[in-house]
Amino acid sequence: MAVLGILIVHGMGAQRPTFADGLINDLDGLLRKAGVDSNAVAWQPAYWASVLNAREEALWNDLSKNNDLDQGKLRRFVLNALGDAVAYRRTDGDEGGVYDKIHDVVNHHLRALREQLGGADRPIVVIAHSLGAVIMSDYIWNEQHPGSRARGSHPLDKMETLCGMVTFGCNIPLFTLALDTVRAIEFPPTSLPDPIKAAARWYNYYDPDDILGWPLKPLSPSYDLAVSQDIAINVGGFFTSWNPASHGEYWTDNSFTHPVAELITKLVAVAPTLQPAVVAPAAPFPKAKRKRKTKS
């Protein structure tokens, strides 16, 4: 039985349900080379793009049907990428909107991860790219400040067993512009036992050429405390490593996957010190509708 669960969350733009396959394969190979049993880790990709696929496709069709629009591929990129960010924004009184639907999907995948872990509240790691980091920060904040938008019913999906955060190409700073006070989530959670808390880390990776990826520690004293380290790396190949296209190049780049595998290896070693309660799910998983999106 796995002792550590890993939730992988994609960012903005056209995405496929298989978005995490390359990362999982690379990390699994690195973990096995480090002597970690493949069965010790449970992987759960959190595919949330299905919430907006149909809306964005319909909007493109409506706008382009009778209009001659130049730069079609670039326009589709802007629609898929910036459209995700604009649609996700939360406003008061809009419960049940895109923000909440995406968080429902996240909760669905967290509960699926808990099932993989034997229905137990074992330690988990979140690996989140781009807008996915914003989504997970918001989800964790809501669980740590319970209200109408909190969804968790067990310690795991309440994020009380969170022992690792890996954000990359992260644009959280852009979303703080709407806030009067910038406060980070509590990391690590106080609910973690001391051995796991001592090993818990939040690493934020960014490529200086990635205009959508930013450091986090300078945002506020609470971010400086919560984020273990902002790490500048160079990702991508000859045509992408020196320009904004680097935003999509982290996933299987050695400068990213190797340190992430090292962190997972350390957390696997201490994960068994948490003795999780095994409790049957309170209700069936909500059915997340999935529609496949093709890249433009």
Image: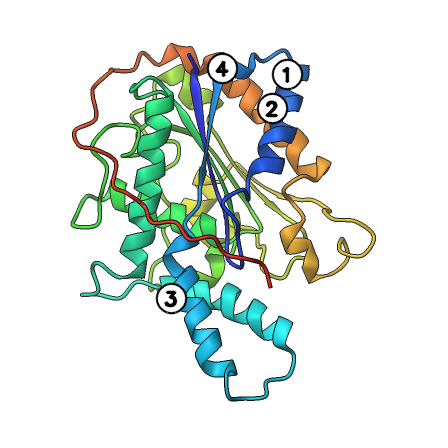
Q: Residues within 10 Å of mark 3 (few under 14, many from 20)?
A: some
Query: Rounded to the nearest whole Å, what is the CA distance between mark 3 and mark 2?
Result: 34 Å
Q: Amino acid at mark 1?
A: Arg
Q: Which residue is mark 3?
A: 87
187, above or below 4, in the image: below
**Residue at (63% x, 55% y) in the render:** 247
Q: Residues within 10 Å of mark 2 (few under 14, many from 20)?
A: some
Query: Rounded to the nearest whole Å, what is the CA distance between mark 1 and mark 2?
Result: 6 Å
Asked if disc 2 and disc 4 are in contact, CB closer than 8 Å, the reply is no
Q: Amino acid at mark 2?
A: Asp
**Residue at (55% x, 19% y) in the render:** 266
Q: In this orientation, which residue lies closer to the viewer: 106 or 259? A: 106
Asked if disc 1 and disc 2 are in contact, CB closer than 8 Å, the reply is yes
Q: In this orientation, which residue lies closer to the viewer: 72 or 35? A: 72
**Residue at (56% x, 12% y) in the render:** 37
**How far across and how far down the image is residue 226, in percent?**
44, 39
Q: Which of disc 2 and disc 3 is earlier in sequence?
A: 2
Q: Which mark is drawn over residue 40? A: 4
Q: Amino acid at mark 4?
A: Ala
Badge 2 element: helix
Q: Which of disc 4 and disc 2 is earlier in sequence?
A: 2
Q: Which of disc 1 and disc 4 is earlier in sequence?
A: 1
What quarter of the picture does the N terminus occupy? top left
78, above or below 288, in the image: below
From the viewer's perspective, is 109 left or right of 247? left
Q: In this orientation, which residue lies closer to the viewer: 175 or 247? A: 247
Asked if disc 4 and disc 1 are in contact, CB closer than 8 Å, the reply is no
Q: Amino acid at mark 3?
A: Ala
Q: Which residue is mark 2?
A: 28
